[in-house]
Amino acid sequence: MPKSNCKHFPNADDHCLVCETEQRAAMRSSVYNDERSTFALHAVTAFRDVCPGSRNEDGSPLIEEAVGDLIANLMHLCVKHGVDPLKQIKNGVCHFAVETIEPDGVSHEAQFNYTVYARPYASGESWQLFDWRNPPASRET
């Protein structure tokens, strides 16, 4: 079977869903949410290729775990580059809300408020307000 001309998976034996999705989106002025989820699946799959984790029986990434790990790693990337990671989470949640209401996202806006608390796992200690700029010291020995 001939190899595909895919820019995402050059050695693929089959067509690429991401390429198909991009081609459909290019024919319209907007991207639909099912296409956004396909783009995200591509990112999660690529992430799992370099950062292994749990997988389904067919070898595909276990989505719930992979998405959580990817979000956490993206937040570490933000900190490394001086970008507020919690602001990016807020922006992402607001984009998701608006795009869920209206895929073009042009006539709605959203607000998301959150507070993060942390404590040592199963410690029974009181929860402390978490500040990513000044995290508490680890108690690991």
Image: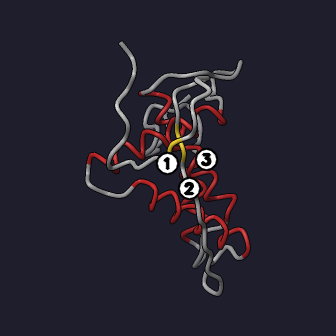
The label on residue 115 is 2
Judged left or right of residue 83, residue 16 is right
Residue furthest toward the bottom?
107
Q: Which one is in front in this view, the residue at disc 1 or the one at disc 3?
A: 1
Apparent side of residue 50 relative to residue 70 in the rendered image (left or right): left
Q: Position of residue 7 (x, y in %)?
A: 42, 46
Going from N to C along the chain, the mark reached first, 1 or 3, is: 3
Q: Quadrant of residue 99?
A: bottom right
**Up-down: is 9 above or below 102?**
above
Name the residue rendered at 63%, 22% in the picture.
55
Instruction: Identify the residue position indicated by label 3 in the image.
Output: 17
**First reached walking from the N terminus: tag 1 or tag 2:** 2
Between 68 and 133, the residue placed more toward the observer is: 133
Of residues 136 and 33, the one drawn nearer to the viewer in this rendering? 136
Location of the C terminus by quadrant is: top left
- Mark 1 and mark 3 residues within 8 Å of each other at the beta carbon: no
Badge 2: how crowded within 10 Å, few (<14), some, or many (20+)?
few
Amino acid beneath label 2: Thr
